[in-house]
Image (spheres, rainbow, N blue to C red):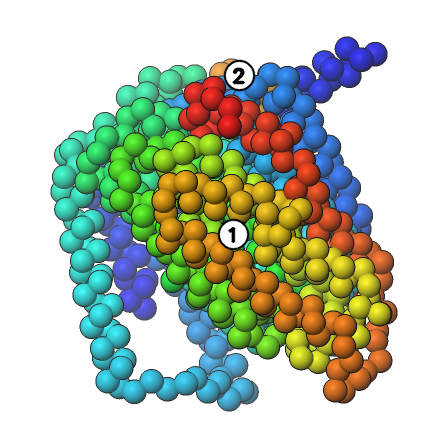
Amino acid sequence: MFFIAFGLLMALAWVRLQAPDVALAEAAIGAGLTGALLLAALSRLNSIEHTTAAPAYPQKSARALQLQSWLAMALLLILNAGLAYSILSLPDTGAGLTPLVTMQLEHSGVKNPVTAVLLNYRGYDTLLEVFVLLLALLSVWSMGTSQQQPEASPGPVLDNLMRLLAPVLILVAAYLLWVGADAPGGAFQAGSVLAAAGVLLLLSGWRLPTRLLDRPLRIVLIAGPAVFIATALATLLSSGRLLQFAPDWAGVLILLIETFATLSIGVTLAALFAGGRPHHPPDRS
Amino acid sequence: MASLINTFINTLNWPVLLILLPLIGAMICFIWPRSAILTGLITLSAVLCCVAGLTWQLLEHGVYRHPVGGWGAPLGIDLYADGLSLIMLLTTALVGSAISVYSTAYLKPQESTRFWPVWLLLLAALNALFLSADLFNLYVTLELMGLAAVTLTALSATRQAYNGAMRYLLATLLGSLCYLLAIALLYHAYATVDISLLAQRVDSSPVSWAAFGLISAGLALKTALFPLHFWLPPAHSSAPAPVSALLSALVVKASFYILLRVWLEIFAPLGAGAVELFGLLGMLAVVWGSIQALRQTRLKLLIAYSTVAQIGYLFMAFPLASNRPQLWAAVLYLALSHALAKSAMFLSAGNLLKYGGHDRISDLDRVVQRLPLTAAAFALAGVSIMGLPPSGGFISKWLLLEAAITQGRWDLALVMIFGGLLAAAYIFKVLGRTFTQAATTHEARAVPASMEWPALLLALGAIVLGFIAIPMFGLIHIGDAFGLGGVQP
């Protein structure tokens, strides 16, 4: 609970620091989805604790523990003091690369400098990040299958609310994706709003039909990474440089990458919320 | 015809393929899990070809630099490859291929479908890491590598494995965060994250000291330098054998590589106090790791503690090599020899585990008669770990010892010799048991050839390194990563 509040306050802090892009991402992921993930993990932990006995850890004496925590606190204080000193010795305004980013903006294909950095100047980082997200899902899936819960009707109120909310959230995601080229927004923010729709649907008892659970789901999950890689290969073949977009094409290519990335990010985050890998995969041998 | 082949080799962009091919392979494994093994093996062969192509390219044209997106530093990210990166890429491809072949026989089918996509992502992360010239990009590759390594640790899905993986996850995340904080500081102060630009701009200020401290602490934690090694033995011993081999041979070396690169390029001119600290921790690691290894009753734990000790040698070299830059090549050679020998040891341990159903050292039963290849692999790998001639381990440790004596560093020299003796003790403790009959004999289970040969070939590789040192040192010095200024050792 504190974590969700912390995420919201962080988002406000980012707005105050005039970083609306980060604020949007923080609000959606830090305050929204992470909290939902933590609560889901907590509920799973509760159900596990009922079935297995707690493992026996070697107990340390209270005195030793107290000594340990005082020692840790002293070390942390020294570390903090050192860091604070070095931060205070920094020049007040680090210019960073902002002038260079603005200067090259017209060649980047978008008008939002954050999107230009993420998808054009440093697109290679984002390419790898997209795979980090896929890997996170692979990790969760490799730990086991999700708890089987049959499709359940949530009752008329929630049902009607969801019928109203889900399309709105999808529209918001599409808007954030489209506006990302000119104003704060973009694939990560749009993807997390899409994921929020998925989480709400899952909470209200909706389930993906079984026939879509295996290969179709997997194809949607890798659509974003796959389109990104395909673009990378295409640019490598046409210009000889990895991810070099011709200025005329840059806008279209970035939108293409972001559209599929949004889809994959949204579904991946919702799948993370659902937990382990889906039941009855036909590849089980 | 020859010129056609030449242009083909020179025009293809091998390093970019080294990063993209494993990513593509991982996606194919994810979509078609049934053909994961085939896809994986094809990808590994392609990666081997790419490394061969890159070697050729570097020998012909010198260092490689590729501005991704055509922007160039500081706005964009550069890929960069010199002799230092090449040796790491070569190690990764060779060790990775041997372990891949091994894993086809070792892992159960269900484990195998989960292993391949994650391992290929790990491979992509390692290749990208060794090719990056950008500190923030290195952070992204570290994240990809760390998460993949944790997932592989938990592959066997036992309580012990989850416990080891969880500790590993927390340790590796803490290391990454320290590293990220350092990059934020450096970027604010110097307005770039490109390594070569930072090298020109960094001056001796509180910020650069704080950044260096944070980077060193974070990466030492990931490299499991004593006393930050607490996560390594449980993680490396509870993972399946091919995964333990990957973690000990490659993943730990990757964070060491970043530390070495950052030290050489950016922080070396700033001061010499840090190298003494590295040297001291390295000495403690050698002594502590070796004694712990000697005390273990389980084979895999023994090998894991041996890794802690051998990492100590890498750090002990810092005070010596900062006076004499030629020695960095010996450090790198030691890392390469250790990667080959340690992966051979873990694979042999996996064979013994399959063959007897346990890895208790005292109950090893007539291994030499029944699994001669495995016993030979373990013994040959042991030769390199102990630093006996002829082996890669011998060449590099000999160079370090010689430097320690000529520089009058008797403390380092004594610890090196003592560590070698302890290594001999713990390796002969295992080897002695392989000849004798155990108190409780048991039926041996057959171990397929595809599990025995990779281990033996890796161990032979560690031995062969003892004979090809001169051409290999030539490769290491491409691009002059150690700042020798044209002076050859």
Q: Residue at x 27, y 44 (%)?
A: B273
Q: Are marks 1 and 2 on the same chain?
A: no
**Point 66% across, 41% down: residue:** B465
Q: Which of these two is toward me, B254 or B280?
A: B280
Please tell me which residue lies in front, B21 or A36: B21
* Whether residue A68 is visible: yes
Question: Does residue B105 appear in the picture of this structure?
Answer: no
Residue identifier under label 1: B252
Q: Secondary structure at mark 1?
A: helix
Instruction: From the top left corner, tell me how far across and down residue A93 is, in percent.
Output: 17, 31
The x, y position of residue B291, in whole percent, is 49, 69
Looking at the rendered structure, the kind of residue marked 1 is Val
The residue at which mark 2 appears reads as A246
Picture layout, residue A110 above or below residue B129: above
Looking at the rendering, which quadrant does residue A121 occupy? top left
Please state the chain letter of the residue tagged with numbered disc 1 in the rendered image. B
Give amino acid for label 2.
Ala
Please report the residue visible at 67 percent of the width from the left and 79 percent of the height from the top.
Answer: B362
Residue A15 higher or lower than B430, as above or below: above
Alpha carbon of mark 1 to alpha carbon of mark 2: how far? 39 Å
Give the quarter of the image for residue B14: top right
